[in-house]
């Protein structure tokens, strides 16, 4: 015969299953989406600047820039020099312009995405998300 203490010991050793909760995402805060997309755009801008710099260094180290400069000089009889047009300051300035434009575009797209989602939720009812606790 099992005692009450044995029954309680069996209950405590048994692992309880995690509770499951199903929630519906019915609203995305506009300013939170703008802030998050801005941070993503800053990260993308840093990656853009570093990648432009590294690509320029690789092209310089392999000699592709000098070969291209020589080729363009032969075609234009030496009137155009790519070395003066595509130096490191010019490349990094172009990378900065591209990064700033990406910063603006990605931030605006995040805001527009949040607005469109909030409008679409009124029709669809939202996104159903399931959570479990372990």
Image: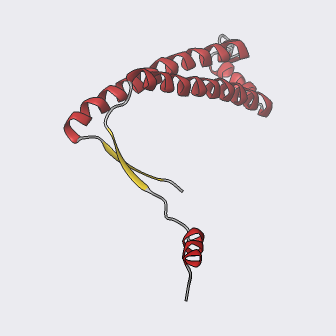
Q: Is residue 34 shown above or below 128?
A: above
Residue located 47% across and 17% down the image: 104
Q: Is residue 15 left or right of residue 70?
A: left
Image location (x, y in percent) of residue 80 = 65, 12
Please name whichever residue, 31 or 20, is drawn nearer the observer in this view of the structure. Answer: 20
Q: Is residue 79 left or right of residue 124?
A: right
Residue located 37% across and 30% down the image: 28
Please name whichever residue, 133 or 90, is drawn nearer the observer in this view of the structure. Answer: 133
Please name whichever residue, 64 or 106, is drawn nearer the observer in this view of the structure. Answer: 106
- Colour scheme in use: secondary structure
Image location (x, y in percent) of residue 61 = 80, 31
Image location (x, y in percent) of residue 130 = 40, 51
Residue located 75% across and 25% down the image: 66
Q: In which quarter of the view is residue 14 placed?
A: bottom right
Residue located 71% across and 15% down the image: 87
Q: In which quarter of the view is residue 123 placed?
A: top left
Quadrant where the N terminus is found in the figure: bottom right
The mark total stands at: 0
């Amino acid at each position: 015969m099992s005692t009450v203490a044995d029954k309680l010991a069996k209950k405590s050793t048994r692992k309880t299953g995690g509770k499951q909760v199903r929630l519906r995402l019915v609203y995305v805060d506009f300013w939170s989406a703008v802030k998050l997309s801005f941070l993503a755009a800053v990260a993308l801008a840093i990656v853009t600047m570093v990648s432009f710099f590294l690509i320029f260094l690789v092209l310089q180290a392999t000699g592709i820039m000098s070969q291209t400069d020589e080729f363009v000089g032969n075609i234009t009889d030496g009137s155009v020099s790519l070395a003066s047009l595509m130096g490191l300051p010019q490349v990094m300035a172009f990378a900065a312009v591209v990064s700033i434009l990406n910063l603006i575009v990605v931030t605006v797209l995040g805001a527009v995405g949040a607005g469109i989602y909030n409008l679409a939720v009124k029709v669809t009812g939202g996104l159903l998300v399931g959570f479990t606790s372990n």
